[in-house]
């Protein structure tokens, strides 16, 4: 299957990777998925293609890539930013199925959140929210989300709040309202409207 990725075909676009992901989702070929996962340890052009294939698979059928959760977390320490944000993207899809595995390595996920690119941070918020859905992890994760809303750039608040919405409930909603109320007047009207779609503030 590695002969079907974009770099192997001499292509600079993502179409071959997306087509391969769709094929593997359709066939549920676990051996082929394993071959693609093995490419994560190869040279950067191969690894970059493979992470793309894997998160395209994850969006459609995360069960196929759950066995490689540890591999994805390992990539969060990569010097290749493409692999870091790609891995965090994959983790958005697998965390709902393997929350305990992801939580057991939470320090590594959190490090990537603190030190990563904008895309890495965006997706880490979704990973945190997926963890927070599980009551065992809510107590640790909620304060991190609240702190993030307190300190992130204003333009990020609506998008990140939307990502957090899956874990906002009657027990914690007041915490979110309090931090959002303190920043609400600094948002544009459009941003305020997006916030109000998730939590009514003003």
Image: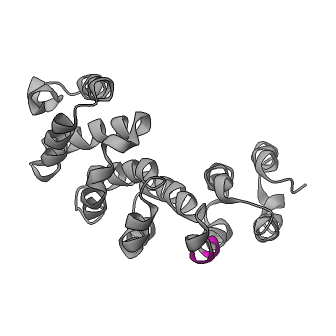
Q: Main secondary structure of the magenta part?
A: helix
In the rendering, at what x and y percent does residue 74 appear?
A: 25, 63
| Position of residue 118 measured from the top left corner of the image (x, y, whole percent) | 46, 55
Q: Is residue 69 left or right of residue 193?
A: left
Q: Residue at x 19, y 46 (%)?
A: 37
Q: Looking at the rendering, which quadrant does residue 178 occupy?
A: bottom right
- Magenta-drawn stretch contains 142: yes
Which percent across, then down, holds residue 39?
13, 45
Return the residue nearer the eye: 15 or 140.
140
Q: Nearer the viewer, residue 98 or 198?
A: 98
Who's the residue at 81% across and 54% down the image?
Answer: 199
Direction right: furthest residue: 202
- Above or below residue 124? Residue 57 is above
Is residue 104 magenta-colored?
A: no
Q: Quadrant of residue 19?
A: top left
Rendered-image quadrant of the C terminus:
bottom right
Percent x, y of residue 11: 17, 24
The span shown in magenta is: 139-143
Give the camera-side residue of 199 and 191.
199
Question: Image check: 180 left or right of 148?
Answer: right
Give the left or right position of residue 185, taking residue 2 as reference: right
Point 31% across, 56% down: residue: 69
Quadrant of the drawing holding the N terminus: top left
Residue at (78%, 59%) from the top-left corner? 186
Scheme of colours in the image: one colour
The relative height of residue 200 versus residue 78 in the rendered view (above or below) is above
Q: Is residue 21 above or below residue 94?
A: above
């Amino acid at each position: 299957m590695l002969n079907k990725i974009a770099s192997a075909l001499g292509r600079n676009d993502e179409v071959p990777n997306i087509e391969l992901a769709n094929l593997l989702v359709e066939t549920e070929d676990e051996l082929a998925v394993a071959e693609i996962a093995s490419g994560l340890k190869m040279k950067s052009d191969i690894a970059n293609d493979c992470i793309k294939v894997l998160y395209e698979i994850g969006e459609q059928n995360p069960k196929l890539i759950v066995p490689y959760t540890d591999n994805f977390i390992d990539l969060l320490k990569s010097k290749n930013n493409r692999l870091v944000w790609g891995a965090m993207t994959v983790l958005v899809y697998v965390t709902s199925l393997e929350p305990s595995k992801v939580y057991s390595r939470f320090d590594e996920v959190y490090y990537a959140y603190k030190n990563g690119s904008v895309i890495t941070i965006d997706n880490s918020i979704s990973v945190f929210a997926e963890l927070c859905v599980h009551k065992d992890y809510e107590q640790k994760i909620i304060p991190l989300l609240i702190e993030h809303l307190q300190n992130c750039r204003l333009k990020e608040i609506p998008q990140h709040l939307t990502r957090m919405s899956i874990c906002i409930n009657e027990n914690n909603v007041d915490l979110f309202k309090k931090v959002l109320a303190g920043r609400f007047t600094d948002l544009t009207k459009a941003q305020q409207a997006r916030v109000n779609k998730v939590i009514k503030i003003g």
